[in-house]
Each structure stands twice: as structure tokens, then as C-alpha cells.
Image (spheres, helix red, strand yellow):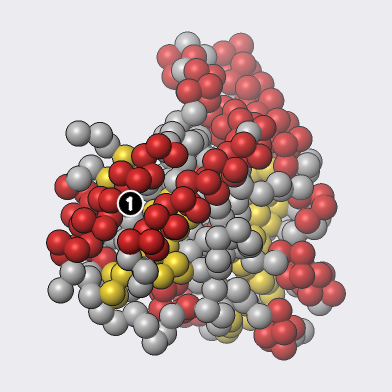
Amino acid sequence: MKKIYLDHAATTPLNPVALNKMLPFFNELYGNPSSVHEMGASSKKAINEARKKVASLLNCKPTEIFFTSSGTEATNWAILGYSEKNPSKKEIIITTIEHHATLHACEYLEKKGYKIHALDVDHEGFLSIEQLKKTINSNTLMVSIIWGNNEIGTIQNLEEIQKICKKHHVALHVDAVQIVGNLKIDLDELGVDFMTFSAHKFYGPKGIGLLYKKEAIDIENLIHGGMQERGLRAGTENVCAIIGLAEALEQSIQSLDSYTNHLSTLSTKLYHQLKSKLPQVRLNGPMIGKDRLPGILSLSFDHIRSFDLAFALDKEHIYVSTGSACNQLNILPSHVLRAIDQENISNTGTIRISFGIQNKVEDILYISDKIVECYLQNKS
Ligand SMILES: Cc1ncc(COP(=O)(O)O)c(C=O)c1O
């Protein structure tokens, strides 16, 4: 029986070119980059080259790139590190559909007396620019926004958000974890202050992320210890993963057009197939085509529980998510679905399908038939 992985927003397989670049660093070039000898120096050189490559791909300075253990760490560092360095301002603006990395870092600050403004989003997941203008004020420390939503695919209007932050001299942190490979990222043009990335979402290894931080901005360390990452993020570097991240980033940027076309074709075909058989199925987030991540389809079905549908598909070796991957044990609709669809969520099951490079157009009919079959067998 064939296995079909449809959960690329949770994680992606490792790009074979990235894997090959990583391999020598496991057991041949294993020197500690902080060591003074030749083997240490060659690891250090490899990291420096990876940093330069990342900086040139994202159009920023190498000194603005900091490798972290994950997107979660990068986000925590931007929010907590910046707030610690700037204690006079105590308000942060986010949206109700942020990833838990942002939500929980902000909840932590809320307990310490910060005011967190979680802006509502509309039915498709867009924040209101007018609301942002009304909320931002002289006490606002930072705006932190998820650029591409991992559950419903909504892509926020970053240009407008950046203009408002700039006008008010408020720092802007952007969670771009789901954006790489889907949209062009030019940090110089975007003018944001912080941006978070995670390699395993763009066919790089797990356990490695990065924080872009504008040179002029200071943040406090999140992790204390040695002098790695220019004294700001201690801990022996994950050399293999850094090499893999840089290579995977290059590959995904190079194949952006063909990749996004492929994902759009798959999403459009599956959505139309399903709609023709189950007209009541609902697509969450923006309509296909505009301001949405091309590979993510969040679909809601009446009279079924998300988990029953996902488990039925699992038995057929079709792997989907019920919301965000970090949410698997939570049986309530996710905070994102609640934020966009307050009225319609009871008695409704939602699955997230997220396509990737190895999914095939010729499998779409099979996938659609299996979803319909599993739905009809499990609905109440
Ligand atoms: C939008 C978004 N932000 C942040 C993260 C966290 O990234 P990581 O898995 O590297 O901690 C994820 C992962 O699911 C994500 O989708």
C-alpha cells in the first residue's frame, strides 16, 4: 500500500544535496569551531561560509545572522531578548493566530507585567491594518507577526505592517518560518528588525533555526555561556546542521517558482476534486491563489471529529495534521481556527493538508477518494 505524506508544514524531508554537504561534518571534519587547531579552524571556516551564503541569499549582512536551535528559540530570543534590553516600554502587539512560540513567549511576559495586545483577524486570517494603527502607541515595544500562517496559510501584508512600525519607531519581529521557498525574502528591502527561520520547514535538518537581527539593534542573550555567535548565543555550534541549513536555503530559493507552481497545482486540484464530491467541505483561510501559502489546505467537514478523520486517513497511510503539529494532543479546535471561525466550529472536523516536493499530481484523485471514503465512514 502506498504511503502519502501530506504534512510538510509540520516538517519536510531532508534535501539530498544538503545531506551530502552535511555528511563529512559528522565524522571527518568534526573539530570544535572554538578549538585553535587546524580541525577547529576548518569547522569555523565552514560556519563562516554558511553564514555568508545565508546572508547573501537573504540580502543582509553576515553579522546579522545568528544560528539557533530552532524557530522557537529564535522567536523567544527576539521577543524576550529585545524586551530585556528595552525595559522602559511594556506593550507588545501580536495577532490571535501566532505560533505558540510567540504566544507563549508573550504569555510569559504578560505574567511579568507586560500588556499584550493580540489583534483579532478576519474570517480569512488577515489582521486589520486600521486596528494595528489604532493599537500602536508610545509604549509599544514591539510588533511580532506571523507572516505565513502554518495552519490556514494566510500571508499578512508585511509591507503595510512595516510602514506603520517604522513610522512609530517600533521594532518589528516577523515569524517567516513557513515563508521560505514560497515567497522571495529580501531583508534589505523589507526593512524589518528581526526575522525567524527554521530549516526543517524548507528541507533542511531539524534542530537548527536562525534569527536575523538588524545590526543597529541590541538584544540580551537568551543562552549564556561561551563566546559563540559573537558572544550573543552560547553553546557549541551544530556545525552539520548549519551547513545543511545554508544548502537547503539555497536550494529552496533557487527552485521557488517551480516549487510554488507545483504546490498550487496540487492544492487547486485536490480542493476542486473534493468540492465536486462533498460540496459542503470548507476551505479555511483565504481562497486559493491570493495571499496564501500555496501548499497548505485547511479543510473543515461537518459531523466528524478532526481526529477521527485524521486517524482514518492514517490507517490508509495518508498522513495529515489536525491543526498545527504542536497541537496534536489538544482535542479543542486550535486557537487559529477559533480565531477565524467563532460560529461554525462546533460539530466540525478540520484537517490540514500540506503538500511538498515529492507529492504527485497523479495521486490527487486517489487522495481525494480516500478522504471522501474516510469521511463517509466516520461521520456521525
Ligand atoms: C509559523 C511557525 N513558527 C514557528 C515554528 C517553530 O519552529 P521550530 O519547529 O523550528 O521550533 C513553526 C513550527 O511549526 C511554525 O510553523
Would residue 147 be seen by someone viewing this image from the given angle? no
Closest to the observer, 166 or 219: 166
Q: Is residue 100 left or right of residue 67?
A: left
Q: Position of residue 70 (x, y in %)?
A: 49, 47
Q: Is mark 1 within 8 Å of ligand 1?
A: no
Pointer 1 residue? 368
Does residue 219 sit above or below 33 in this rendering?
below
Would residue 66 be seen by someone viewing this image from the given angle? yes
Q: Residue at 81% x, 50% y: name it.
A: 188
Q: Residue at 29% x, 82% y: name it.
A: 346
Closest to the observer, 348 or 134: 348
Does residue 37 sit above or below 278 in this rendering?
above
Image quarter hosting the C terminus? bottom left
Q: Residue at 20% x, 57% y: name it.
A: 374
- Dot 1: element: helix
Amino acid tagged 1: Ser
